[in-house]
Amino acid sequence: MNAYTAETPPAIVAIAAAAALAVLTIGALVVAPAQLDSGRAPDAVVARAAAPSEVSISPARIDVIAIRTPNVAWALEDNTKPNCKPEV
């Protein structure tokens, strides 16, 4: 069976693909949003901002009282093994 040999070198195809991807990415992320947003005046965007409103939080205060048991190796007390550094 005869192997297929492409006339175009793979390096040229890879460079062309990278260039096409760069052009499409810039077009999708920069040019298209600028074209879609160009119809609005900047003042119209500011005028539509919501006015601040007062919010009541109920209950206004939450007190949490708890004791957490240590569950990490350095915080656990292990009396079976001697200390690396003896206390002075």
Image (tube, rainbow, N blue to C red):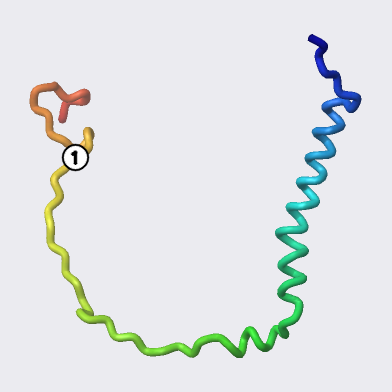
| Among the 4 quarters of the image, the one containing residue 11 | top right
**47 to the left or right of 80:** right
Q: Nearer the viewer, residue 85 or 15?
A: 15
Task: Identify the element where label 1 is drawn.
Answer: loop
**Residue reaching furthest to the right:** 7
**Disc 1 designates what residue?**
71
Q: Reply above or below: 27 against 5.
A: below
Q: Amino acid at mark 1?
A: Asn
The residue shown at (87%, 31%) is 12
Q: Residues within 10 Å of mark 1 (few under 14, many from 20)?
A: few
Q: Reply above or below: 15 against 47.
A: above
**Residue reaching furthest to the front:** 1
Which image quadrant: the C terminus? top left
The location of residue 80, given as percent across then percent down, is: 9, 23
Q: Nearer the viewer, residue 86 or 50?
A: 50
The residue shown at (27%, 81%) is 57
**58 to the left or right of 13:** left
The residue shown at (82%, 43%) is 19
The location of residue 65, given as percent across then percent down, is: 13, 62
Q: Nearer the viewer, residue 51 or 29?
A: 29
Q: Reply above or below: 72 against 62.
A: above
| Among the 4 quarters of the image, the one containing residue 85 | top left
The location of residue 6, given as percent across then percent down, is: 86, 23
The residue shown at (72%, 85%) is 41
